[in-house]
Image: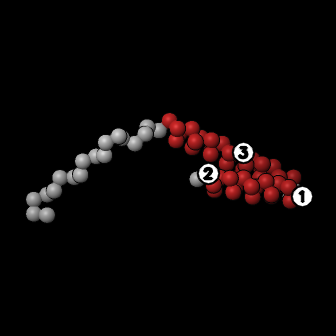
């Protein structure tokens, strides 16, 4: 996910520098902020998520006749 966020930020930065229209620049900067904020939230939630259980779950019981 972070590779895509980084690539998006790079393309938006290129758009900011190449655009001569102030409205486009403002929109691209706002989009950059939104992408950066979303990546930060995902990173923080990933740290807060519980880790995988130490013992794997037992396999499901076999049904009679299988």
Mark closest to the chain's N terminus, 2 or 1: 2
- The part of the image, by quadrant, that contains residue 66 is bottom left
What kind of element bears circle 3?
Answer: helix
Q: Which residue is drawn at 78% across and 48% down?
A: 29
Q: Which of marks 2 and 3 is in front?
A: 2
Q: Are marks 2 and 3 in contact (CB under 8 Å)?
A: no
Q: Where is residue 11 in the image (x, y as percent from the top left)?
A: 75, 58
> What residue did someone put label 2 on?
2
> What residue did someone put label 1 on?
20
Q: Position of residue 5 (x, y in %)?
A: 65, 52
Crowding at mark 3 (Cα within 10 Å: few <14, some 14-19, many 20+): few
Q: Where is residue 45 in the image (x, y as percent from the top left)?
A: 53, 39
Q: Residue at x 80, y 58 (%)?
A: 15
Mark closest to the chain's N terminus, 2 or 3: 2
Crowding at mark 2 (Cα within 10 Å: few <14, some 14-19, many 20+): few
Q: Which residue is drawn at 52% across and 38% down?
A: 47
């Amino acid at each position: 996910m972070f590779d895509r966020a980084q690539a998006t930020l790079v393309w938006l930065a290129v758009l900011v520098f190449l655009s001569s229209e102030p409205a486009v620049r403002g929109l691209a900067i706002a989009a950059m902020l939104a992408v950066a904020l979303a990546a930060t939230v995902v990173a923080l939630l990933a740290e807060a998520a519980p880790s995988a259980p130490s013992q794997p779950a037992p396999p499901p019981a076999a049904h009679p006749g299988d």
